[in-house]
Image (tube, rainbow, N blue to C red):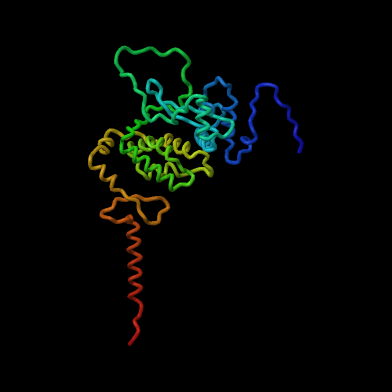
Amino acid sequence: MQKHAIPPARFFTQVSNDIIRHPRLSAEAVRLLMWQLSLPGDVDQPLSETAKRAGIKKTAFQRAKQELIAEGYVHEWRGQGAHGRWATRQLVSNVPLSAEEALVARDGDRPAEPPTAVEPTAVEPATGEPEGRSVGRSQENTEGNTQNPPSQPSPSSPLIERGALALSSVSHRERQLCLTGREVAELAPLAAEWFLRGASLTDLREALTLGLPERVHSAAALVRDRLTRKLPPMPSFAEQRVQETPAAEPRVASMRECRGEHVQPRLFRPVAEETLCPACRREQAAETATTTTRRRLIPLPHG
């Protein structure tokens, strides 16, 4: 087959064949990445706006974005500004970058900042005369802005320790989500926010492990994205009052993981010291009864 190609003289973007022929990127992901790379350097446009201009629907955009994050072409960091407003910073590259390489590309020669802000910046009290709007260009890259930002529990909170234990358990069980001790410590506040909002250990584990891509380029980036994007809503005032009652704490503390055979880990509340959930105990009792019945039906030899 013959090809006839005339290279453009102006207004073009160089894209490697590794992106065009990538075996794990969908057509929408390649299109989104090429559109973003084609933007002028002085244009501050989030991926969501680029997807709209490229004609990529919302569901396809979310899937394409996750593919690019998993392959290392997109990295995100959430943080607070001086006035307490939460926003997401995005980095898009034409080559796959690890989490460490992305931080270097983001910060240049400056010391690398932590991937996420775990302690909110102090906000001035809402007193006195209102201030006018700051002069200058409005911030367009506010894809991560939220009306209900994570409250970020204190580092000494038991929820932080519980979040770290939950992430360590997921990292130990799921080979694709293997995290280092430092990554677990950095992600623990986000996991703690799940528990603060009433999520269970099973909810957290399923959100992190269900529907994983075939190849995970950065486990920490994928876990951070899922913890942030799938964060459950803040419970209502009535639900918060129920969670704050003293009787709720022993109930959570007494939960135990069943040692029986399950596709997904199953938690149950033991009555005494049993290690199997009620379903496994009933199944074990049924097997024992069947064995006993068979023994009784064996004929005895005549003497």
Quarter of the image with the N terminus in it: top right
Q: Position of residue 225 (x, y in %)?
A: 45, 35
Who's the residue at 37% across and 50% down the image?
266
Quarter of the image with the C terminus in it: bottom left
Instruction: Relative to 85, say whether 64 is above or below.
Output: below
Q: Position of residue 293 (x, y in %)?
A: 33, 72
Who's the residue at 42% across and 45% down the image?
170
Q: Position of residue 110 (x, y in %)?
A: 49, 24
Q: Which residue reaches farthest bottom?
A: 303
Instruction: Relative to 272, say whether 302 is above or below.
Output: below
Relative to 247, 229 lies left or right: right
Relative to 50, 133 lies left or right: left
Who's the residue at 46% across and 20% down the image?
139
Relative to 282, 212 lies left or right: right
Instruction: Relative to 265, say whether 179 is above or below.
Output: above
Task: Name the quadrant containing residue 157.
Answer: top left
* Number of marks in picture: 0
Q: Position of residue 286 (x, y in %)?
A: 34, 64
In this view, the residue in front, 154 or 137, is 154
Q: Which residue reaches farthest left?
A: 246
Task: Name the quadrant containing residue 155.
Answer: top left
